[in-house]
Image (tube, rainbow, N blue to C red):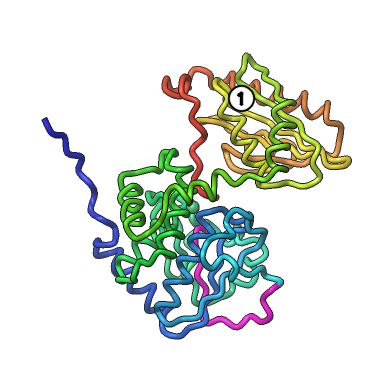
Amino acid sequence: MIFCMAMSPARSSEKSFRQQAVEFAALLGGEKSVLVGSHKSPDGDALCSLLAAARILTILSSRPVCVVDGQIPERFNFLPGADQIRSLAQLTSWNFDAVLTVDCGSLSRLGALADRIGSEPLLVNIDHHPDNSLFGRLNIIFPEASSTAELLYDIILALNVPLDVDLATILYTGLMTDTGGFRYSNTSSTAFAMAARLVQAGADPAILAQAIYSNNSLHGIKLLGEAAHSLDLSAGGRVASMTVQQPEASEELEEITDFALTIKGVRALALFRLAGNTVRCSLRARGSHDVARIARKYGGGGHQKAAGFTWDGSLEEIRIRVLADLREEVEEQLENIPAAEKILPTPPFKRGE
Ligand SMILES: [Mn+2]
C-alpha cells in the first residue's frame, strides 16, 4: 500500500502571496535607497534574511544597506555579503527612500534602530513571529513559515529572481538555524521541500552544518567545562542550575544554557553568571513551564521559555530563592507533561528571536 501525504500548495503560487510579493517589488524596487534592518543581537535567520533581502533588492535595481544593532556572531562571517552589514554607528548619513525589516516582531526589537525606523513612512515588514505587531505599511507575516528565510525564498520564487549558489547558501543557513538543524517542531514538509531546492541550487548541507555547528572557539569549550563542572540538579532532577564567572554575556553561554536543558528529566534551568558584584541570572524552561514570571519577580523579563534578570546581591541568596521558585514551577505542572516529553530529551522549540 502506498501512503501519500498531501502537500499544501506552495505559498509562492498562492494568489494573495503573489500579490504581496508584487507589492513588495513595487514599493522597494526601482532604484530606491533601502535600509534593511532586523532585530538586535541578530541570530542566523535574522542575518540570512537581511542578506537575502539585500540581494533581492539589488536585482530589483535598488540600493540596499543592511544595518543591525549588536554583534554579528563570528560563525556567520562566512556568509556571502556578511561584511556589508553595518552597525548604526557606521552609518554616515540617514538618507533612505524606504525601510524593510525582516524577522523582527516589533519596532522595539530593532534596538537602537527603532527610533529612526519608527518614523519612516515607507516601511515593509516581513516576518514569521506570531505576535508581530504589524507596524509596516506592507506586512508580509506568516506565522506558519519555519523562518523568515522561507518567506524570502517564496518571494524569490514569486518574482522569478534567479537562485544562485550564494543566495541558496544564505537561505539554507537561515532555514537550518531557525529549525535548530531541522529538529524543532517548525521543521515542516515545506521546510524540507525548500531545503531540497536550495541544495539543488548549490547549497552544501555538510559544509554549512559544519560552519555553524562545528565551529566552536576554545574559549567556548572551556566555558562549557566550567559550566558543566558546576551543574547541579534539584527538585528530583527536574531543575538544573549552573554558575560561571564571566564578566560578559556571550553567544557561547547561551548555547551552553540551552544544551544543559537537554539533560533527561530536566524541566527548567537557571544559569548564574557572576560579573563583578552583580549576578546575572538566565532562566530556561521546557514545555509549558513559564520562567518569565519568575524573572519579572526580580525586575527582569523575557519569554515564557527564556528569561532573565540582574541581581545586585549575594549569589547564595538569589540561588536559594530562584531554585525554590523553579521547584514550585515544575511541581505545579508535573501532571501536564506529555508522555513523549517525559522520555525524549528534546530541546525546547525555538522560533528565531
Ligand atoms: Mn526567525
Label 1 neighbourhood size at 10 Å, few (<14), some (14-19), many (20+)? Answer: many
Quarter in which the N terminus is drawn: top left
| Rendered location of residue 126, percent (x, y) | 45, 62
Give SS at disc 1: helix
| Rendered location of residue 188, percent (x, y) | 34, 44
Q: Residue at x 56, y 43 (%)?
A: 214
Q: Residue at x 44, y 57 (%)?
A: 148
Quadrant in which residue 169 is drawn: bottom left
Horizontal relation, residue 244 to residue 341: left or right: right
Residue at image mark 1: 329
Q: How many marks?
A: 1
| Rendered location of residue 219, percent (x, y) | 72, 43
Farthest left residue?
A: 1
Q: Residue at x 45, y 77 (%)?
A: 58
Q: Amino acid at mark 1?
A: Glu
Farthest top residue?
A: 236
Residue 99 highlighted magenta (yes or no): yes
Residue 60 highlighted magenta (yes or no): no
Q: Residue at x 35, y 57 (%)?
A: 198
| Rendered location of residue 247, percent (x, y) | 81, 45
Above or below: residue 152 compared with residue 220? below
Horizontal relation, residue 346 to residue 158: left or right: right
Above or below: residue 94 compared with residue 198? below
Horizontal relation, residue 309 to residue 256: left or right: right
**Part of the protein shown in magenta:** 90-103
Above or below: residue 113 compared with residue 94? above
